[in-house]
Amino acid sequence: MGQTASILVVDDQPEILENLALLLEAEGYQVLTAGDGLEAMAILQTHPVDLIVADIAMPRMNGYQLYQRVRENPQWLALPFLFLTARALDSDIRYGKELGVDDYLTKPIQPEDLIAAIQGKLRRAQQLAQLVHQSLVGLTPEPRALVLGRLRIDPAQHRVWMDDTPVLLSAREFTLLEYLAQKANQVVPLQELVRITHELDTDAIEAGTLLRPLIRSLRRKLGYDVGEMGCIENVRGVGYRLVPPEHP
């Protein structure tokens, strides 16, 4: 980030909160701390924050509820959000990823792994901010809204509607949907998609593993039932294709 990044750490255990704050401050970050989701929301209303690291099991407002509240505010839609939690069951991790959180980390965690995750998310946020700035100053044309049947995507505002109903997506989910929409009716390879969503060059197997939770979450948020492909079709072993959802 151009200036020292500000990180909000949310955890109801004071010792963990203090240790995380000391670690991040030693790396040069400005750190704000909160003991639960309600305290975090109060801080967000009054302090600019570049990234959130939050526990899940907390009183008053837990991490899931905090994440949903943050994503409901367009001002914080692109704010990187990481879960750091002792909930390490596959079902917990799967649920967290399906919500659209930017990363799901489990305790205990090596300090260097946490720092690496934070640095990667901040770097991506900076790149997105630069693109937005270029658009605002006229260096790149403002992207036009994409209308595909019942689906409408506004790249400039990072907003999506199915019919006239807003669809709340994480930054990574939005990136995936927008890219598929730009190539509507084309099969986009798994490895190409994961380069866009995760900035990662990998094989098709790992790419498919990383993309499946995002695709499931997207389908559900677009209103499709579990197990239903809807407008995002899976071409087994190849990739995904967005077919414009038509009006009945």
Image: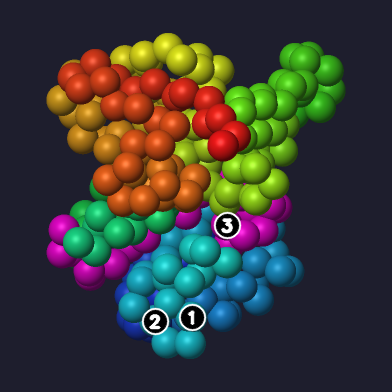
Label drawn at residue 58: 2
Q: Would residue 154 be found to the left or right of residue 174 on screen?
A: right
In terms of image quadrants, where is residue 3?
A: top right
Q: Secondary structure at mark 2?
A: loop
Q: Which residues are magenta?
A: 70-90
Q: Amino acid at mark 2?
A: Met
Q: Would residue 129 be found to the left or right of residue 229 on screen?
A: right
Q: How many marks?
A: 3
Label drawn at residue 7: none
- Can you say whether 43 is above or below 5 in the image? below
Q: Would residue 203 be found to the left or right of residue 83 on screen?
A: left
**CA distance separating discs 3 and 2:** 19 Å
**CA distance separating discs 3 and 1:** 15 Å
- Mark 2, Cα crowd under 10 Å, few <14 / some 14-19 / many 20+, is some
Q: Earlier in the sequence, mark 3 or mark 2?
A: 2
Q: Earlier in the sequence, mark 3 or mark 1?
A: 1
Quadrant that contains the N terminus: top right
Q: Secondary structure at mark 1?
A: loop
Q: Are marks 3 and 2 in contact (CB under 8 Å)?
A: no
Q: Would residue 103 be found to the left or right of residue 34 on screen?
A: left
Label drawn at residue 71: 3
